[in-house]
Amino acid sequence: MSRTRSATGSGRGVHRRSVLAATGAVALSAGVAHALRPSDSQAATAGETTGAVSASSRLAPAAPLAPYTRGTTLANVATPRGGAGYRRLGDGPGWRRVVRSELAAPKSGRAGRRTALAAFVQLTDLHIIDAQHPLRLEYLRSADVHAWRPHEALTVQGAIALVERINALRGGPVTGAPLHFAMTTGDNTDNSARSELEWFLTVMSGGRVTPGTGDPRRYEGVQNSGLPLYWQPDAALRDRDKQAGFPRLDGFLKAAVREVRSPGLNLPWYSTVGNHDSLPMGCYASHRDPYLTELAVGGRKLMDVPAADARRLQTLIKKARDPEGVRYHDFLKAHARSMRPVTPDESRAPFTPAEYVEAHLDPAHRGMGPVGHGYSSANLDAGTQYYSFRVSDDVVGISLDTTDPAGHYEGSLGTAQLKWLDRTLRLNKDSYAVVFSHHTSRTMTNLRRDPARPGERRHDGREVLALLGGHRNVLAWVNGHVHKNVITPHSASGGRSFWEISTASHVDFPQLARVVELADNKDGTLSLFTTLVESSAPHRTDFSDLSQTGLASLYRELSLNAPGARTTLGGDPEDRNTELVLKKG
């Protein structure tokens, strides 16, 4: 029988791993904060305590659910048909579960002994895109075919289909435990635009979305520009993508910006911030540049530049030679005469980190809760975007902010946050811990000083690994950013070990989310089960179906065929559906 309990008001009893919850207030951050109970989350604060954020977990069913495969990639997976040109998708065989024993030897009979500790869903890199936004880097496609995706106008429809899939899950596929929550691990938006943030929050919490900005009567973007550089779905123009086999779809753009409805997740969800949520275009620390803000909301859009100019700008971005966007500002001014007229729209304005937190706290976006989806007024007061929360009696969750406010798309942690992480793990030493972030350990290489804290040192992924390896209660570090399924074992001295679980995005094929289940095998080991899921959209696409569901299906197939799309993002079998075995700390 599962030992997980509902995190509603009745689930606050004393437990051997909940001693802290019964003893009152303890220090969790730079100030004083409450110990985490199964109904609390706690932001990092810079001063005195504020009230903890209430949360609720999906109620456990009356009887344990049986293991299942339906609706997961264990049962079947969208599989390409044909070997050349534009490929269609169809139903294919599922991916088997792989037992990984690098950190502990699995013992026979464990399936009959184990009890569930927690189960949750990870969504990552949704990249909700305002495809008509004036400050997009689509024109870099003249130098790099990866710089623009033909399916970018359909991110909202694709994300809604993923929400529908999660809502249909019966619980943990292995343990049958109720799903406690969902966590988005960053890059929820693509261009740090208010329009994108509003759409993301509505998709997650439920409501209606019209995924277009500017003129409500017509699309104004690269896909009806007449430029052969981009797929022109409604036109007879023989653009580059149609030459590669992309179809002509009359009515596509009208359908893409038509109002859609999201049911919202039917379980609580939490939010972790990514570089595309913190920085315009995911790389520029340019929130205070009035010229760029004016372009974002104004009536001009750059759609085409010479390949040589695009290549130079792309080099500046990749080499992090313009983290504050100064040279980008000059680049746009130099190409001002090439900009095309579009309809101005104030909703395209960039949002600040504080506005990101405020939007999560908006009651209109509460959905199934918790209020703020992990963030609280304490985050606003302290200027932070990291927090901890109670998952179950046995498990605590920790959400980090690995973005670097100084610019560039790779990440790091400041000293204050690193110390807070260490303190939070120590104060919750009687609970297992799952750490969430956007960046992976290998992509935390950006050590630029935070302009708001110039005296504070930044810390890379190796230092974070060393800190996590010093705590016996850490089970997993769950993240995204690399758009690829990768699972990495980490071991430290004294027998300490944990798994790093990186999950593919939902913007690039194969467009996946991941269910993670934690179980005690009652034999000195723990098992973490990872199971990948696709959206609810049919694998087979009907080009004549431009409904909300049809577009979600097309979203997946177009992502498969995006020129230059990597074919390895699904990862190897040992990075997909797994049982990850650990020794108990």
Image (cartoon, grey):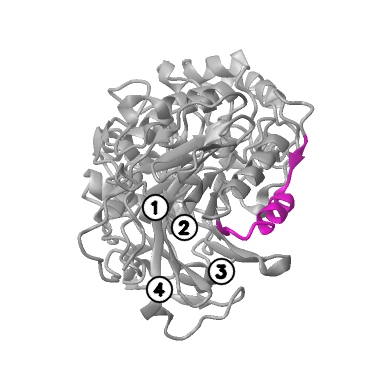
Residue type at mark 4?
Arg
Q: Earlier in the sequence, mark 2 or mark 4?
A: 2
Q: Which residues are magenta?
A: 457-476
- The mark closer to the camera, 2 or 3, is 2
N-term-proximal mark, 2 vs 3: 2
Q: Position of residue 265 (x, y in %)?
A: 30, 44
Residue at (27, 23) in percent of width and height: 217
Asked if the magenta segment contains residue 467, the reply would be yes
For the residues labelled 2 and 4, the Cα–Cα distance comes to 18 Å
Q: CA distance from mark 1 to mark 3?
A: 44 Å
Q: Which mark is residue 445?
A: none
Q: Are marks 4 and 3 in contact (CB under 8 Å)?
A: no
Q: Which residue is mark 2?
A: 16
What is the secondary structure assignment of the residue under circle 1?
helix
Is residue 564 shown above or below 325? Answer: below
The quarter holding residue 119 reads bottom left
Number of the front mark, 2 or 4: 2
Please state which amino acid type lies under the numbered disc 1.
Leu
Name the N-terminal-most of marks 1 and 2: 2
Mark 2, Cα crowd under 10 Å, few <14 / some 14-19 / many 20+, is few
Q: Secondary structure at mark 2?
A: loop
Rendered-image quadrant of the N terminus: bottom left
Q: Is label 4 in a helix, a strand or a loop? A: loop
Tag 3 residue: 584
User: Foreground residue, 145 or 198?
Assistant: 198
Image coords of residue 345 (percent x, y)? 41, 17
Between 5 and 570, the residue placed more toward the observer is 5
Q: Amino acid at mark 2?
A: Arg
Q: In terms of depth relative to the viewer, which is nearer, 298 or 337?
A: 298
The answer for how far apart the CA atoms under marks 2 and 3 are is 15 Å
Residue bearing mark 1? 558
Q: Name the residue that disc number 4 marks.
A: 114
